[in-house]
Amino acid sequence: MAGTAAAAFDPGSWSGSSPDLAPSAHRDGFARDSLPPREQWPEFRFDLPELRYPLRLNCAVELLDRNLALGRDDHPAVVSPVETLTYRQLAERVDRLANVLVRDLGLVPGNRVLLRSANTPWMVTAYFAVWKAGGIVVGTMPLLRAKELGVMLRKARVSHALCDARLGGEMRKAAADAPDLRHLVFWGEGGELESRCAAAPVRFDACDTAADDVCLIGFTSGTTGEPKGTMHFHRDMLAVCDSYSHYVLRPEPSDMFIGSPPLAFTFGLGGLVLFPFRVGATSVLLEKAPPEELLSAIARHRATVCFTAPTAWRAMAQQAHRHDLSTLRKCVSAGETLPKPTFEAWQAATGLKLMDGIGSTEMLHIFIGAREEEVRPGATGKPVPGYEAKVVGEDGREVPRGRIGRLAVRGPTGCRYLADPRQSRYVQDGWNLTGDTFVQDEDGYFWFLARSDDMIISAGYNIAGPEVEEALLSHPTVRECGVVGAPDPERGQIVKAYVVLKDGHAPDAAMAKALQEHVKAAIAPYKYPRTVEFLDALPRTETGKLQRFALRALAAQGGA
C-alpha cells in the first residue's frame, strides 16, 4: 500500500492498551494533549495486511493525490447540480485552498478548522485542504443553531472556520462567543474564499503528518446533552475504507456513489467521500436529498451505490416504481435499526437487498454488517473483517449465544474522546461499549434489540433528550419536562415531551404548538418534540431524580 513515507510498520506500536505514538507534525499540540490517558484507550487491532500502514501518512495524499498517480486525472471525482470536478480539478482546488489556509490565514498543523455547509464540492474541498495542511476538521451539520455551534467552537478551541455564505447567520452568532476563533471565511454569494483560492498557488506540499496525528473531531451528543468530541487519526480514514468498504461493500472505480447523510455525519463522510475516493470512483453530492429527490437523482446520474437511513428506504420503496433504478447495485442502510418490513418492501420493489450495518461516531463507521449475498433479513450482520465483537453481561464477560447483553467491539478504530470523563464508560477492558443491546445467534449474526441509554434515534438522527428538555425549559410557561423516544412505525422513534406547565397556562393544542416552534428556534429543527403531552407532575425518585424509565413506559403505551 502506498504511503507518504517509507517508515516500516511496527505492529507493537498500534496494538495493546498503551500504544506508542509516532512524533507528531502538529505545532499546535492541543489535540494530542487532549487525548484520553493511554490506559483508557481501547485495544486496537491491525491483523489484516491492508491495515498495516506506514508510521507517517497524510490521508489527503492517500485518498486524493493517489488517484492522480494512478492515472485517474480526468475521471469525475464529484458531481453536483452546480459543477462536476475531475480528480485533477479537485486536487488543484484543494491545493489552492491549502495555500490560502497556510499562507493567508496562518494555519499551523494541529489547528482546528470548523466546516459548515451542505454536501457540496466546496465542502469536500475544505475537508481535503485542511487534512493536507495538517489541520483538524470539525464538521458541522447545516441545521445546527448558534448555541450548538458555539459549544463545538469552544470545546475544540477552533481557530479557523470555513462556511457556506447561505449559512452565515447562525455562524456569525456563534463566532461572537468563540474566543479562540481567529478567522471566519465564507464561500458562495458574498463570500471571498473563491477569489482567494483563484489567486493562490496551484501546488501545495502535503504536511508530513504522523499516521496517528488527529485529523478529525466528530461531535456526537450523549445522553446528558453535552456533546462529545470523538478524535480520529489520519490512519482511521483509511482503516474504515480498507475494512468495511474493501471487504463488505466492495466498490469499483466505475461506481457512482450517492446518498442523503451530511458529510458531518461520519456515515456520510465514509459513504460519500472516503469509500469512493479510496478506489477512484465518483461521488454525487446533493444539498438536500428527501426520498423523492434521492430517487430522481439515482435515475438521473445512473448511480450504483446508495447510502441512506431506514426511514428513507421505507419511503423510497413506495415510490421506486416511478423511477429507473436499473443501475443501482449496492444499497447501504445505517443510522438506526433496519426493520425487517422495510428490508422486504425495498427488495420487493427493486429486487435489491439492503445492506444493514451498525457504526458509531466513536468508531468512525460501520463495524458490523454483511455482504449482500450474506444478508440475513432482520439481523445487523457479522463483525466486519478487521473487527471483533461480542455480547457481554454487566460484569463485562461474554454471554452465551442467544442471551441478551451489551455490544462490545474492537478493531482498527476506536473511541478517543476529546478531554471527556465519559471515556471510561465507553471503553472498558480494551473494548468499545457502544451503548446498544444485542443478541448473537448460533451462526454468529448479531441482532439489534434496543439502545442501552437515553439517546433517541429518529429517522437516522441522534437526538439527546436532555438537550430538548433544556430548550423546552427556556420557554416561560414550562415548569418542568422530560423527553424520551416514543415508538413510531415510520421514523423508528419520535421525540416525545412530557411537560408540566406553570400555573395559569392552558395545556391545549395551541400551547403544544407554541412549545414545538420554540424548540425549533432554539436548537436544530429536527430535534423538536413531535408529540407533547401535558402532566400534572413528572415521575421522580425520592431524591428528586427524573424517572426516565417511567416516561419511556408511558411513551411505549402510546400516551400519558
Image: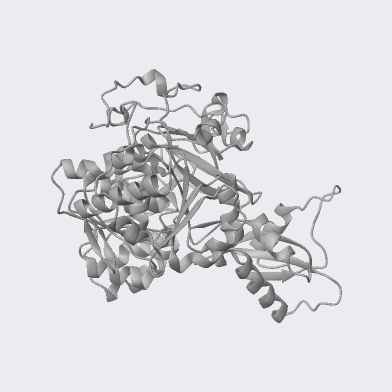
Point out residue 309 in the picture as x, y percentages from the top left corner. Answer: 42, 59
In-image side of 475 versus 373 (left or right):
right
Q: Say which of 87 and 293 sits in front.
A: 87
Q: How is the image coloured?
A: one colour
- Residue 362 vs residue 274: left or right? right
Say above or below: 356 vs 398: below
Residue 366: give x, y in percent of width and height.
40, 44
Q: Residue at x 34, y 65 (%)?
A: 286
Query: Residue drawn 18% across and 45% down?
Result: 68
Name the residue furthest bottom: 510
325 relative to 307 in the view: left or right:
left
Residue 452 vertical position relative to residue 480 in the rendered view, above or below: above
Classify residue 245 by image quadrant: top left
**Residue placed most toward the observer, 214 or 301:** 214
Q: Nearer the viewer, residue 15 or 395?
A: 15
In the rendered image, the quadrant that contains the C terminus is bottom right
Examine the image and state in which quarter residue 9 appears: top left
The answer to whether any part of residue 31 appears in the image is yes
Give how far across and how far down residue 157 sits, in percent.
Answer: 56, 44
- Asked whether the viewer can see residue 145, the reply is no
Q: Position of residue 85 (x, y in %)?
A: 23, 58
| Number of dots carrying numbers | 0
Quarter containing the N terminus: top left
Foreground of the two, 472 or 35: 35
